[in-house]
Amino acid sequence: MKHLLLTGLFILFLSCQPTSRRNLNRQGHDVSVKYAELFSIGDYQNFKILRIEQAYPSSPVYTYVFSNSPKNIPDSLKDIPFIQTPVKHIVLTSTTHLPALTLLHEENSLVAFPGTQYVSSPAIRKKIDEKKIQEIGFQGRLNPEKVLALKPDLVMLFNSGKDIRNDDLYTRNGINTLYNADWMETTPLGRAEWIKVFGLLFGKEQLADSIFKQIAYRYNQVKHKIAGQKNRVRVFQGGKLGDKWFVPGGNSYAARLIKDAGGKYMWQTDKHNGSLQLNYENVLLNLPEADVWLNPGMYASQKELLRDIPEIVEMPAYKNNRIYTYNLKKGTTGGVLYFEYSHAHPDWVLLDLFHIFYPQDNEYNFHFYQKLP
């Protein structure tokens, strides 16, 4: 009911009705967000409003107000979570959030992270080794006592929607929280555009916007190279887990990358955003048609793959040595580079895929992928 009690511009910012903006600040406007669909930023004279549409499946809308002083916040917004900027001390909970810190030169702001052994960034690893970043849990599950003792300005969370969590524990103890929903975006540039949220947190909106424009420019450069390509490489992506096979849905983030890089995904007509679970008979109808096979699973070599799935010996992707994986490129402590960097650098992923599908430069140095040995 609290949204019904709000007055002025904020109510209409939420409902996208233009008359509301005049009530709080005639100079207010929306920050440009071109690709991301799950956040928007309203920029007013002394404060900003961040709206996150879907932090996790079936989540409510989350709204936050930002300013360098609580005195700048109108009475009509007092019930909305307030975050004072710039944030000085932050806790992150996913390796996908880390590249934004290094791109914005905010490594020193990170005070704790769960599962530090999976961090690959050299700059952040240095802080970890120097004990300037504390270990606070494992695989996103935080140790709340340690977090509360640190008293950070902000804990950035993500939630799959399936976990039983107590995220409001921090807000009840005076620590701000904010959900990052970049993983819910269905387009590569939509995920990368979340750097603008980090720019808002650290008071570096212009730098974040500039960085994102460069990423989008490089991504679209590659995409335009193959715009007129008619005979596209046929691509199978996915692998075996137990007796089931999992492949990306035809409307997924992974399928979009394949399409933008010039590939013809074998399930491109499928409408699912997530993964598809298949039996081997279904796989055998498609895999023999593929020119390239991406990410066959956690195999370290073709020998391992062939031992587990001997039927592939006659398949073109195997016979022509065109099986590629991102699982083998790791940081110094074993973290897979793709998992940490790919959200923030879809331009690197796209360039890798373009060179896999249409190899032209033998000297090209892949960021994430390599041929399965």
Image: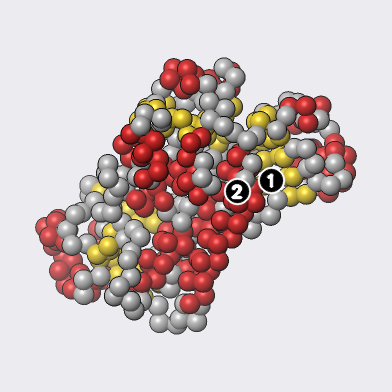
Residue in the foreground of this view, choosing between 26 and 280: 26
Residue in the foreground of this view, choosing between 152 and 308: 152
Secondary element at image label 1: strand
Among the 4 quarters of the image, the one containing residue 87: top right
Residue 361 placement (x, y as % from top left): 33, 76
**Which residue sits at x=33%, y=40%?**
118
**Which residue sits at x=45%, y=35%?**
93
Secondary element at image label 2: helix
Residue in the foreground of this view, choosing between 142 and 52: 142
Residue type at tag 2: Lys
**Which residue sits at x=57%, y=43%?**
198
Give the labeled residue for mark 1.
Answer: 41
The reply, left or right, for residue 163 in relation to residue 46 is left
Q: Dots 1 and 2: beta carbons under 8 Å?
A: yes
**Which residue sits at x=42%, y=61%?**
348
Q: CA distance from mark 1 to mark 2?
A: 9 Å
The reply, left or right, for residue 167 in relation to residue 134 is right
How many discs appear? 2
Q: Is residue 251 above or below residue 127?
A: below
Q: Earlier in the sequence, mark 1 or mark 2?
A: 1
Q: Is residue 365 above or below residue 45?
A: below
Q: Is residue 240 visible?
A: no
Give the labeled residue for mark 2.
Answer: 196
Among the 4 quarters of the image, the one containing residue 290: bottom left
The reply, left or right, for residue 91 in relation to residue 318 is right
Residue 78 placement (x, y as % from top left): 75, 26
Q: Quadrant of the N terminus?
A: top right
